[in-house]
Image (cartoon, helix red, strand yellow):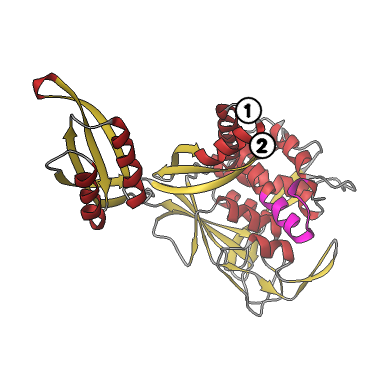
Amino acid sequence: MRTLYFDCFAGVSGNMILGGLAALGIDREELVSQLRSVTPVDFAIDFTDVNRSGISSLHANVRVPEEKAHRHLREIEKIIDASAVSELVKGRSNSIFRRLAEAEGKVHGVAAEKVHFHEVGAMDAIIDIVGACIGFELLGIERFVCSKIHLGSGFVDMAHGKFPVPPPAVTELLKGVPFYSTEVQGELATPTGVAIVTTVCEEFGSGAEMTVDQVGYGAGTREYDRFPNVLRMIIGETAAVRSQIITDQLVLLETNIDDLSPQILGFVMERAFEIGALDCWFTPIQMKKNRPAVMLSVLCESERRTELSDLIYQETTTLGIRVRPVERECLEREFVSVETEFGPIDVKIGKLNGRVVNAMPEYEQVRRIALAKGIAFRTVRDAALSVFNVTRSRSATS
């Protein structure tokens, strides 16, 4: 897989990412051309060759007219959705801004949609974020990996006052991400830069196993003595990531029955699940003397075999049970919660090779809402799937 590795030994910012992408050889004219469809104001990006403590790098300076108005999330999403960039770029860009809004909202105690963006809602931040996503697409990146993030130290002046490094919103964005601080003074990791890498990257750590093809350095604006304030961006090939396939060694109990009441069969199924059967089913079959019959099948873990066999012998008329060891494969599974017009609903998803291949809202939750509101089951189920698919499309991480 074509992989981009962010080596954040000097932190990360939006303009460092733009500079690094330019150093990696993206078509700068194409980048600016696509950004023209996004921005409602005139702008320019100056790419300058600079030297940061002996490392030749590119500094990206975004120039936009001064703005006094600040934007909310929906305004930013409308700007991006109305542009001519690809759906992949729109989805990634909106996901990054939503992640920013959720972090800001958590800090200020408001919903993401109510967040009144200051620095990150400015047009230069929009250019940084959408421009980065355009660059990723131009380079054909399939996978993103990031190092531990160097944060710097000290204090930083922001719209709400003076805050320690990292400021509150950045701290929220860093949840679950490895980072560190040193004696280097200043804010090395900005909200925009951290939002970009924490949204697109699948893996964080000290390194990635890859074959290196290209290396580019994006320069930060601040200069230090004997410390290269640059973001190293490496493109290479990594092995395709395969989702974990879970394999279980199970036991299948089967028996054919042609002389038992359906009521008792129903009871046997209920008891089998209560005891711990993983699955239980009936198959219509034809037995000797042309008798219609049922094959009872019970799938279980080996430690449940004796208890379930005893149930079958005690409650049915069978005189024998076929026992077979079976191997079961399962996709990697997880639950995600979606907010629908009827309330929150959990959706169980299955992944293959990192891609969602199955999604289904939880039956009991859908059933409960449908009964409580007096609406069709499929209306609630389809609403949950619709929200899930829209969210998935915006994240563009399948």
Residue range (magenta): 99-113
Asked whether residue 319 is drawn in magenta, I would say no
| 276 is higher (above) or lower (below) than 369 | below
The residue positioned 29% from the left and 36% from the top of the image is 264
Relative side of 188 to 249, left or right: right
Q: Quadrant of residue 259?
A: top left
Please give the residue where the numbered disc 1 appears in the rendered image.
375
**Amino acid of disc 1:** Ile
As drawn, the residue found furthest toward the left would be: 289
Q: Residues within 10 Å of mark 1 (few under 14, many from 20)?
A: few
Rendered location of residue 107, percent (x, y): 75, 61
**Amino acid of disc 2:** Phe
Q: Nearer the viewer, residue 204 or 300?
A: 300
Rendered location of residue 25, percent (x, y): 55, 46
Secondary structure predominantly adopted by residues drawn in magenta: helix
Q: Quadrant of residue 87?
A: top right
Q: Is residue 220 visible?
A: no
Mark 1 element type: loop
| 294 is higher (above) or lower (below) than 66 | above
Relative side of 130 to 160, left or right: left
Circle nearer the N terminus (1, 2): 2
Mark 1 touches mark 2? (CB < 8 Å): yes
Please give the residue where the numbered disc 2 appears in the rendered image.
342
Relative side of 275 to 81, left or right: left
